[in-house]
Image (cartoon, helix red, strand yellow):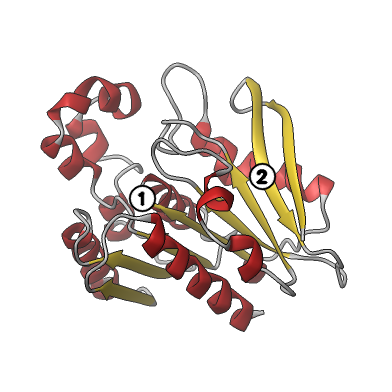
Amino acid sequence: MADLAISFFSDSLKMKTSIKVLLPDHVDSSLSTLILFHGMGDDENSWMENTSLLRYLSNKQLAVIMPRVDLSYYTNLSSGEKYFDYVSRELMIKCSQWFPLKQDREHCFIAGLSMGGYGALKVALSRSEKFSRCYALSAVTNIVDQWCQHPERDSWYRSLFVSQDELSNSTNNLFSLVKNWPHSNQKPYIWQTCGQNDAFSQQNQLFHNLLVQEDFKTTSLSIANEGHTWHFWDQQIQLVINDINNCL
C-alpha cells in the first residue's frame, strides 16, 4: 500500500489543511473510495496510529481518504470555515483530480468513529446521491442529548450549532434528517456498531430503531463487554473493510 500525507489549500476552509491517503500498490483501472473520519481529539493520522488498517487493506482495490477536521463536528461554522462543505463535496472533487477514483455512488463509501461517526451519518444522509453505504462506529447520534449531559461544553456547542432549539430543527440533527427524508431520494445503507459499555449505546439503539421505522436498510451491532476504545474500533474497521470488499 502507498501511504500518502498531503497538504493543500481548501476553498471551503479558506486555509491549508491535510489528509492521509492509502492506495493499493497496483491499481487495476480505477478505485472505489472509503472516506474515513476521525473522532474528537484525533486527526487524519489516528486510524493509522491506532489500528491495523493498512494490513486489512492488503490486496483491496480501495482508496481510503482520511481528512482532518479538528473539533468542527463536520459542520459549517459561523466563523467561516465550512467543514461540512469540505468533507461532503470539495474533498472528493480534489481527490478525484489527483487519483483514479470511481465516481458512481455504488463505489463510494463513508465511515467514522464517535464524532466522526456522526459526521459520516450526516454526510451519507445529506448526500445519498454520492454515498451508497455508511458505517458508523460508536457514533454520536444525538448531539442535543450530549449537550444536556455536558454543560461544560456549552460554549463549544454554541459555536457550532448556536442553540439546542436551532440544532433540533436543522440538518445537523440526524433524527430530523431521517424523519424528513424526501421520498424521491435514494436511501443509503446504514451500518452501526457500538459497545454495550459505551455511553453512546442507548442513543445508537434509538437511532437504529428510527431507521428501521423509516424503512432504511440498516444493520446494528451491539457488542457485549466493549466500550469507547481503539481496541474495539480496530476490530470493527476490519469488518467494515470486509463488507465493502464484498460489495465490489
Task: Quarter of the image for the N terminus: give it.
Answer: bottom right
Question: Pointer 2: residues within 10 angstroms few (<14), some, or many (20+)?
Answer: many
Residue 154 picture location, percent across and down: 20, 24
Could you tell me which secondary element the residue under label 1 belongs to? loop
Q: Is residue 151 above or below residue 232?
A: above
Identify the residue at image location x=48%, y=50%. Answer: 123
Question: Pointer 1: residues within 10 angstroms few (<14), some, or many (20+)?
Answer: many
| Res 114 label | 1
Identify the residue at image location x=50%, y=19%. Answer: 80
Task: Quarter of the image for the C terminus: give it.
Answer: bottom right
Using the image as rendered, state which of residue 95 and residue 152 is in the foreground: 152
- Dividing the picture into quadrants, the one containing residue 220 is bottom left
- Dividing the picture into quadrants, the one containing residue 52 is bottom right
Circle 2 residue: 20
The reply to whether residue 1 is visible in this rendering is yes
Query: Is the residue under label 1 in contact with that under label 2 (CB below 8 Å)?
Result: no
Distance from disc 2 to disc 1, alpha carbons, whole Å, reads 19 Å
Amino acid at dot 1: Ser
Identify the residue at image location x=46%, y=54%. Answer: 112
Using the image as rendered, state which of residue 142 and residue 46 is in the foreground: 46
From this viewpoint, which residue is outermost toward the bottom?
246
